[in-house]
């Protein structure tokens, strides 16, 4: 994936995390169901949270190096 | 082991002692080696977890017990900000490193044109907004000590006689002392406190382990995770929670996301204490993981507490009271230390961060204003003053927190207090986002927006928290001020269907953002704001010729003086030696370049904030401040363009004028050429007539052999006469052209004009006699001294009189001559009683070769050069020859000459 696409993916990842935590999407899991004794919405919130942490870990490794990126940005910009 | 109040207090003091040791070793460690473990991303992440305070440790459990899953939003917001680190935090850290930003107030003030008012505003509002948060920590520590004292079989021990307020005061006082010991030992060049960060990291480990330990104990005691929820459900507790995902959920998630950026202590650990931008990369997932671990056991602890603790026990203290109730005193002590730890780390860092803001944005500017013309006290004055200011502000901040605690002591839950603070600091968010992303955001708009947001916050969030202790506030809450119901703090403009938290968040941030956007669209940035905005938004680094820098001249000595006062002897000398090495100059003859001055400014900004550093340096650097300098530069460029175009305009005007002149000269030349042609043709014509006559008569004389003597004589006489005429014509032409070219030599002297007139009259007498003309001499002047040539003047007068005689066609011809003095002029008039000169001919009478109608008819016709020559002569004598208009009869010519009044002296 190119640098630009990676950054776009990181943005999408963050925004979809926000959407997953907010109504109306989160309301899908607001039911009186228990999973291994734990209410579904609690399981859902912690599962998404864990998923976000794992995703962030992946992104933290693949997102380009900061100093290199600023150099690249400098190259990109018409001077 | 028996847990008593005395024991926990002793344990707390011992724990603080341990922290102090860690901080001390940490400082030494970083000073000796280059950071090592203490500058790792691991410690960085742990220090960020200062976000989890006793609000998390105690309050989250209470919140979970009261309203279910909602507590988790406080961690989900920051999680989203951290996994999106690339977009906001990375930028923030990068810019702050570049600009040596020391606090959130510094960030905003620096971005908005190093605006001091904005820095002061943000500092004041932060101090006010944080007061509830500090109160929360005091309350948590007090309650936890109380909880142990109540449970202890040995009673209150040495706490006997101390009520809750007294205890809170004691806690606040101790915290003030700790913080002063920890945070204000020195003023660091970059405001980094490695020792404190090490201690905070240790505390992060302690509180997490304590909470996890209590959580594992709960799961174990309840017989597994399922047991916790099943037990709670059986005890009749609603484990599902209704309306979890409502307006309150959204509002508190937004607030938490804002708080992780805007809280002064979070800014301090995340941005200011960051020693390597790549650490943020690790923290982006590790900090959310830390928060997840902290939150994991909150719900079980809450539900287990609700299930087994007696009704009416404080759910905020479950973390502590559950192990106590189970008789696990060791675990309870550990839990207490964990809670204490979370409170101390928050208080220490928050007050350090706030005290830096207070000293840099309020005390230093005041000092600079009060100190006369850059005299900034003794050598160590600034540093000592800074430290004292910070100590004083730490005390002030803690006791502000205590004041809030005192006023709201009757409300019991911890979490709502924290949310009030969050709403307060969230008012900085719009300005920060604008600072990072919107070039046109202006300082005026930012000041207005933050002020408006804060006013709404004070009214809709801060004020209602006093409702339990103040009846008048409760009355305002119910009916609005003076009964104005649409101003009720929790139902502004009648908006009463929202949760109070969401209500306050909505109105304050809505007003804030609207004012910021509209204000920025309507106002103009100053030059410095413009420059700073460019520096913040163009993240590729600074250009060497940085436009925002101070320019002008300053001696190295002056700069060193300032640097030593603020940065300390060693750092200042390091800086100057490095500059000396780089430029290759000798230390003493260092010429501070503008790049060096701006580097020094950044270095100073690291200690006292951008605005203060700027003011301080501009007192030393002679010449203008940046804004003026910058404006001048911009004006200069404009001026140059204007000057350039003016030069162009002038040149083209000159060219136009030259072209006009050339054209006029050309026209004149052509005119002169034409005149010359005309003159030549006239001359040819004049010469031709006598020549024709001479030729004709010579031919007759040559061809006719038998002419009588008389005829021959007659012919010869004609030839002679015509030759004379030719000669006189040529003489006249030569004379005139010489006169016109000014070649004739003049004998200019003071003469008596009357003598010349006498001479002329005597010459003309004979001619008059022959023509039968009467010369009538009128009034005469006795003598008239004029400057000129006597012979020439006679010539003119002869010409005039002879003309008058020759062209007089009257039956009894008379020529009158008179002279008189008119003012400073001498005048001679020659008039006749002839036919006069027809009006149509009058304008041409002085033209060359012009002879009037009458002149051509007479036998004495001359060449027509007499009058032009006369006029030229008179003109050379500075006089005028003119035809007197409207003479009674005939023609009247007048000569006017200037009288010489001075003593007779021949002019050169």
Image: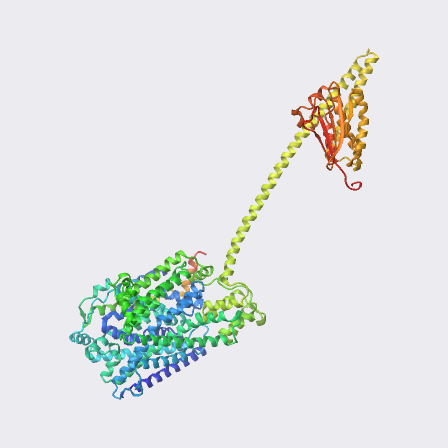
Looking at the image, residue B110 lies above or below residue B2: above
Looking at the image, residue A31 lies above or below residue B214: above
Residue B654 position by quadrant? top right
Q: Residue furthest right?
A: B709
Residue B433 position by quadrant? bottom left
Colour setting:
rainbow
Residue at the image position 48 percent from the left and 67 percent from the top: B614
| Residue B626 at x, y percent in the picture | 50, 62
* Residue A17 seen by the camera: no
Q: Nearer the viewer, residue B514 or B569?
A: B514
| Residue B892 at x, y percent in the picture | 71, 27
Q: Quadrant of the N terminus of chain B?
A: bottom left
Please indicate whether residue B600 sits to the left or right of residue B249 in the image: right
Please indicate whether residue A50 sits to the left or right of residue B533 in the image: left
* Residue B204 seen by the camera: yes
Q: Quadrant of the C terminus of chain B?
A: top right
Residue B775 position by quadrant? top right
Q: Nearer the viewer, residue B365 or B70?
A: B365
Q: Nearer the viewer, residue B840 or B415?
A: B840
| Residue B721 at x, y percent in the picture | 79, 20
All told, the count of numbered labels is 0
Q: Residue furthest top?
A: B706
| Residue B400 at x, y percent in the picture | 36, 75
């Amino acid at each position: 994936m190119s640098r630009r696409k990676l950054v776009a993916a990181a943005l999408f990842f963050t925004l979809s995390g926000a959407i997953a935590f907010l109504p109306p999407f989160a309301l899908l899991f607001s039911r009186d169901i228990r999973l291994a004794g734990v209410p579904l919405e609690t399981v859902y919130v912690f599962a998404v949270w864990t998923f976000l942490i794992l995703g962030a870990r992946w992104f933290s490794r693949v997102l380009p190096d900061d100093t290199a990126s600023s150099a690249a940005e400098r190259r990109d910009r018409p001077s | 082991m028996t847990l008593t109040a005395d024991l926990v207090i002793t344990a707390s003091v011992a724990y603080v002692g341990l922290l102090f040791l860690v901080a001390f070793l940490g400082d030494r460690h970083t000073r000796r080696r280059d950071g090592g473990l203490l500058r790792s991303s691991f410690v960085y992440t742990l220090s960020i977890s200062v976000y989890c305070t006793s609000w998390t440790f105690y309050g989250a459990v209470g919140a979970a017990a009261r309203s279910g899953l909602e507590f988790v939003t406080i961690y989900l917001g920051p999680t989203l900000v951290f996994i999106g680190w690339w977009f906001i935090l990375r930028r923030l850290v990068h810019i702050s490193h570049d600009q040596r930003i020391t606090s959130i107030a510094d960030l905003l003030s620096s971005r908005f044109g190093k605006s001091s008012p904005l820095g002061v505003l943000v500092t004041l509002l932060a101090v006010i907004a944080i007061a509830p948060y500090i109160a929360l920590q005091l309350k948590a520590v007090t309650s936890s000590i109380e909880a142990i004292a109540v449970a202890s079989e040995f009673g209150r021990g040495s706490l006997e006689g101390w009520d809750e307020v007294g205890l809170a005061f004691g806690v606040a006082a101790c915290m003030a002392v700790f913080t002063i010991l920890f945070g204000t030992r020195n003023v660091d060049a970059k405001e980094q406190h490695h020792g404190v960060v090490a201690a905070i990291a240790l505390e992060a480990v302690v509180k997490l382990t304590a909470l996890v330990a209590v959580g594992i104990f709960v799961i174990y005691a309840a017989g597994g995770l399922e047991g916790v929820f099943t037990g709670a459900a059986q005890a009749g507790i609603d484990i599902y929670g209704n309306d979890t995902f409502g307006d309150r959920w959204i509002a508190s998630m937004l607030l938490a996301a804002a708080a992780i950026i805007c809280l002064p202590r979070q800014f301090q650990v995340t941005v200011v204490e960051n020693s390597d931008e790549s650490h943020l990369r690790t923290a982006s997932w590790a900090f959310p993981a830390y928060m997840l671990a902290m939150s994991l056991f909150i719900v079980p602890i809450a539900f287990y507490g609700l299930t087994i603790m007696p009704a009416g026990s404080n759910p905020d203290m479950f973390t502590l009271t559950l192990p106590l109730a189970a008789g696990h005193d060791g675990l309870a002590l550990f839990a207490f230390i964990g809670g204490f730890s979370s409170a101390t780390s928050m208080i220490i860092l928050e007050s350090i961060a706030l005290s830096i803001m207070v000293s840099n944005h309020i005390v230093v500017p005041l000092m600079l204003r009060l100190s006369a013309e850059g005299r900034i006290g003794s050598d160590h004055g600034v540093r000592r003053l800074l430290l004292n200011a910070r100590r004083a502000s730490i005390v002030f901040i803690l006791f502000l927190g205590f004041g809030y605690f005192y006023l709201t002591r009757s409300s019991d839950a911890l979490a709502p207090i924290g949310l009030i603070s969050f709403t307060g600091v969230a008012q900085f968010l719009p300005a920060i986002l604008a600072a990072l992303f919107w070039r046109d955001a202006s300082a005026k708009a930012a000041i207005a927006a933050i002020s408006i947001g804060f006013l709404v916050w004070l009214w809709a969030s801060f004020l209602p928290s006093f409702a339990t202790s103040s009846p008048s506030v409760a009355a305002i809450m119910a009916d609005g001020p003076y009964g104005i119901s649409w101003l009720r703090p929790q139902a502004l403009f009648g908006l009463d269907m929202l949760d109070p938290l969401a209500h306050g968040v909505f109105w304050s941030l809505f007003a804030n953002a609207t004012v910021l956007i509209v204000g920025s669209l309507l106002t103009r940035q100053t030059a410095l704001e413009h420059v700073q905005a460019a520096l913040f938004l163009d993240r590729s680094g600074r250009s060497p010729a940085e436009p925002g820098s101070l320019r002008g001249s300053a001696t190295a000595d002056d700069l060193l003086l300032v640097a030593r006062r603020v940065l300390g002897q060693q750092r200042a000398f390091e800086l100057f030696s490095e500059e000396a090495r780089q430029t290759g100059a000798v230390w003493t003859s260092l010429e501070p370049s503008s790049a060096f001055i701006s580097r020094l400014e950044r270095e100073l900004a690291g200690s006292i904030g951008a605005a203060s550093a700027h003011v301080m340096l501009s007192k030393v650097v002679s010449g203008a401040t940046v804004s003026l300098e910058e404006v001048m530069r911009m004006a200069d460029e404009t001026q140059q363009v204007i000057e350039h175009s003016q030069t162009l305009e002038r040149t083209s005007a000159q060219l136009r004028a030259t072209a006009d002149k050339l054209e006029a000269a050309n026209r004149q030349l052509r005119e002169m050429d034409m005149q010359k042609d005309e003159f030549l043709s006239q001359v040819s014509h004049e010469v031709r007539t006598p020549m024709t006559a001479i030729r004709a008569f010579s031919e007759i004389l040559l061809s006719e052999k038998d002419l009588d003597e008389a005829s021959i004589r007659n012919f010869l006489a004609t030839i002679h006469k015509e030759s004379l005429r030719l000669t006189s014509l040529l003489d006249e032409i030569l004379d005139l052209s010489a006169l016109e070219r000014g070649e004739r030599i003049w004998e200019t002297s003071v003469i008596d004009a009357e003598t010349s007139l006498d001479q002329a009259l005597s010459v003309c007498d004979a001619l008059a006699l022959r023509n039968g003309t009467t010369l009538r001499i009128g009034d005469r002047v006795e003598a008239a001294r004029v400057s000129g040539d006597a012979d020439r003047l006679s010539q003119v007068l002869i010409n005039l009189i002879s003309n008058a005689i020759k062209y007089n066609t009257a039956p009894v011809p008379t020529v009158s001559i008179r002279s008189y003095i008119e003012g400073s002029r001498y005048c001679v008039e020659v008039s006749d009683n002839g036919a006069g000169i027809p009006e149509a001919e009058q304008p041409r009478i002085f033209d060359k070769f012009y002879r009037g109608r009458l002149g051509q008819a007479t036998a004495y016709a001359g060449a027509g050069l007499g009058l032009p020559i006369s006029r030229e002569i008179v003109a050379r004598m500075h006089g005028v020859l003119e035809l007197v208009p409207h003479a009674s009869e005939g023609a009247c010519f007048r000569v006017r000459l200037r009288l010489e009044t001075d003593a007779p002296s021949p002019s050169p």
